[in-house]
Amino acid sequence: MNDLRRKLAAGLVLGFIVLLGLALLGDIRQVVSHLALFNWALLPLILGGTLFNYSLRFLKWHYYLGLIGAGGISGWESARLFVAGFPLAVTPGKVGEALKGVWIHHAGNVPVAKGIPVVIAERMSDGIAVLVLSTFGVIAFPRYWPAFATILGLLFTGLLIIEIRPLALRLVNLAGRLPFLEKITPALLDFYESVYLLFRPFPTLLAVGLGTLAWTGEGFAMYLVLRGLGVPSGLDAFSIAVFTLSFSTVLGAVSTLPGGLGAAEASIAGMLQLLLGVTISTASAATLIIRFCTLWFGIGVGLVVWLFSGDLLFLDPPQGDERPA
């Protein structure tokens, strides 16, 4: 936990530096002026788009828990674990999110090796969902096609390997022969069985469908941010807003930076300038607002849950807990 706290603190510091750099890049006086003139009456609707995203992603999370045999976790406890995971997104490479596998183990008597694939399935289904939302934008703006095709190809290659069971099991067995992995071969098999189950066609289609609707909610929030800054309404503006947020989310994820910090902000601001023709100060203000209402809002809510969840912070299992990890 001490190591996790250090990584989380580093992520928060990086976040502050990125936000400050963004404000300076857009001329801090101009950015402040845009923020002062922003239509803050839209804020509840913007946060509503974010909460819509979280709600649908929670349904996906809870569905995944049932698939791996953790259906005994109540809806309330499942929601607590889900929200408590938000701050872990700003750990380098999001490695801190593996901690959710331990939380699932304590709450649902499920081996950690079977719980961690839920986190992977969440991320991969979200990745496919935002790529789906990016499709129309890539068609309209062919310059993004190479990056889009590369990321999509990597995702589907991974899914194909997972679902070709003989090939996947052979790879797991080969990995188990390595000296530093030999002792955890049973855990690797548990891990694969869970991954295989989560990425069967129906669960994948359901998860991607929920994810697509969820990220449309945040795309709508992006559109409202642009409207609040005076960008004219219309289908073109809405489409660009959804495409910008979706594709920037993908770029932030593949960057492996904590929370996509830096990569996501740069791509949002750059794409808004390029595709909408707004000034750098307007793009910077829009980026600051949407990141506060999505990433930082979620982290704040998650940290509030942490205040009342010492068992998650310090990994104190219930008395007499003898569950196997």
Image (cartoon, grey):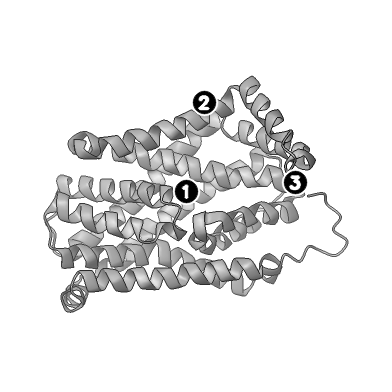
Q: Is residue 152 left or right of residue 119?
A: left
Report the residue at 48% width, 31% height from top: 205
Q: Position of residue 68 (x, y in %)?
A: 68, 39
Report the residue at 35% width, 63% height from top: 291
Residue at image mark 1? 56
Q: Is residue 91 left or right of residue 282?
A: right
Q: Is residue 209 left or right of residue 163?
A: left
In this view, 15 is above or below 74: below
Label 2, residues with CA under 10 Å away: few <14, some 14-19, many ≥20: some
Q: Amino acid at mark 1?
A: Leu
Report the residue at 17% width, 72% height from top: 34
Q: Position of residue 50 (x, y in %)?
A: 39, 58
Q: Position of residue 22 (x, y in %)?
A: 27, 68
Report the residue at 48% width, 40% height from top: 125
Q: Amino acid at mark 3?
A: Pro
Q: Is residue 184 left or right of residue 37?
A: right
